[in-house]
Image (cartoon, rainbow, N blue to C red):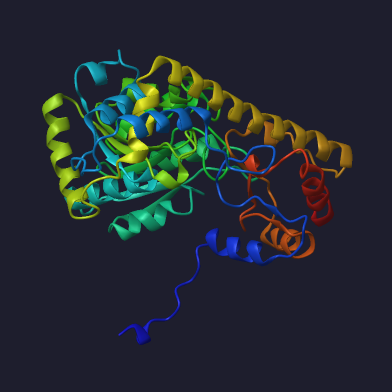
Amino acid sequence: MFELFDTAPPDSILGLAGAFRKDENSEKINLMVGVFKNEQGRTPVLDCVKAAERRLLESEDTKGYLGIDGAPEYVRAVQELLFTPEHDIVQQRRAATVQTPGGTGALRVAADLMHGKFPTAKIWCSKPTWGNHPKVFAAAGLEVAWYRYLDDTGVGLDFDAMLAGLNQVPAGDIVCLHACCHNPTGVDPSLEQWRRIASVVKERGVLALVDFAYQGFADGIREDAAALAILADALPEFLVCNSFSKNFGLYGERVGGLTIVAPHAAAAQAALSHAKACVRSNYSNPPRHGGAIVTTILQDDALRAQWEQEVAAMRTRIADMRTLIVGTMAELNVGRDFSFIQKQRGMFSYTGLTPLQVDQLRSEWSIYIVGDGRINIAGVTPSNVRRLCKGIAAVL
C-alpha cells in the first residue's frame, strides 16, 4: 500500500531547514524557525528551568500517567497566568483548562471540539496567519475562511478592512485571533482597537479562539494579556490556546493548554467533558515533565521572579535587535524607511520583501527567511545584523 504514496510536499519552514543545514557558507543566517536565540545564536535553557528541574529530580516519585486534562495544579497556574488569580473567571470557576502537548496540541483539541459540536461552523483566520493554523483546523474538519489584516504596504494593520471582514462573519462561526505578537507579521491592534474587535465579536454572535503563544515577548507578562482581559470583559465565552515554548524556552517539552471560558461553572465543566473526550481519542493524556517545570516555577515566589527577569531579558534582546536593524538600514541609505520594524512586536517581523527577493537572499547571501518575507528577529545577533542588512539592501 505504501508504494502507492507520492512524496508529501515539505513544510514551508521545516523544508528550508534542511537546505540551511546543507549550505556550506560559514556566514549563513537562519531566520526561519520561530525559536528564541541569544546573542551567541543558541537557544538557551533558562536558569529558572534548570533550578526547577533540579527540584523535580529530587522530589519526583512517579512517572505515572496524568489525568486526561493534566495536573490540577498546572491547570490552576495556567488560568491564573492568563487572567490573574483575582479575576472573576478564575474565582467563579468559569474556566476549564486542558493541559496539552504545546500550543499546537491546544489548537487541535479546540478544533476537534468545535467541529465535533458545531460541524457546519467555519473558522476565520487573519490573512496572513501562522502557516500551521489552516492545516491544523482543516485536519480537524473545520472549513477555513479569511478576513483581511494587513494594509497595502504589507507591514501595517488595515484595521478598517479587518473590522469590515469580522462584520461579515456569520453568527455561530469561529474567529481566530492573536492575543499579541501576531505571527507572522508582528503587527498588533491597539487596545482601543481590541475593544472594537471584542464589540464586533459579541454583536455578531461568533466564538473567539485566541492564540496566545508569546506572553511576555511584547511589553510584559501582564501587559501582553491586556487583549485577553478586554475580551474577558466583553464576552461570556471564548477559547484560549496558550504555549510555554517561547516564554519558558520549553520548545522540546511541548507544554501548552486549552482554556475554555464559559458563562458559568456548570457550562465550563460540561465543555471540559467534551474536550477530554477529544483528548482521549487523540493522545490520551499529556506529557508530565514540561508541565511540572512550569508549575514549579509559577508556584514558587523566587523562581517566579527569576522567570520574569529572564523573560524581560529575552524581550529586551528582541527589541534591541529591532532597533539595530532599523539603524543599520538607515546607515546603508537604501531609500526605504524600515522604521516599521520597531513598531511591530514580538519575535517576528514582516519585511515587505517579495518572494523573488527572498530567493535572492538565500541563493546569493545564504540568508534564509520564509517566502512571505517573515524574519525571526530573535535569530538576529550583533554579529550577523550588518550582513543581514547588506543582503536586504542588495536585493531591494
Point out residue 352 in the picture as x, y percentages from the top left corner. 68, 48
Q: Give the quarter of the figure containing the N terminus.
A: bottom left
Q: Residue at x 60, y 62 (%)?
A: 16
In this orientation, does residue 200 appear?
no
Residue 239 at what x, y percent from top left?
Answer: 30, 36
Q: Position of residue 219 (x, y in %)?
A: 55, 23
- Position in image of residue 138 (x %, y %): 34, 58
Instruction: Identify the image quadrant of residue 261.
Output: top left
Judge whether residue 349 can be spotted in this image: yes
Q: Residue at x 43, y 50 (%)?
A: 146
Query: 382 and 95: which one is in front?
Result: 382
Please say if 203 is above or below 274. above
Number of marks drawn: 0
Question: Which of 246 and 214 lies nearest the eye of the viewer?
Answer: 246
335 vs 59, left or right, is: right
- Farthest-out residue, front: 58
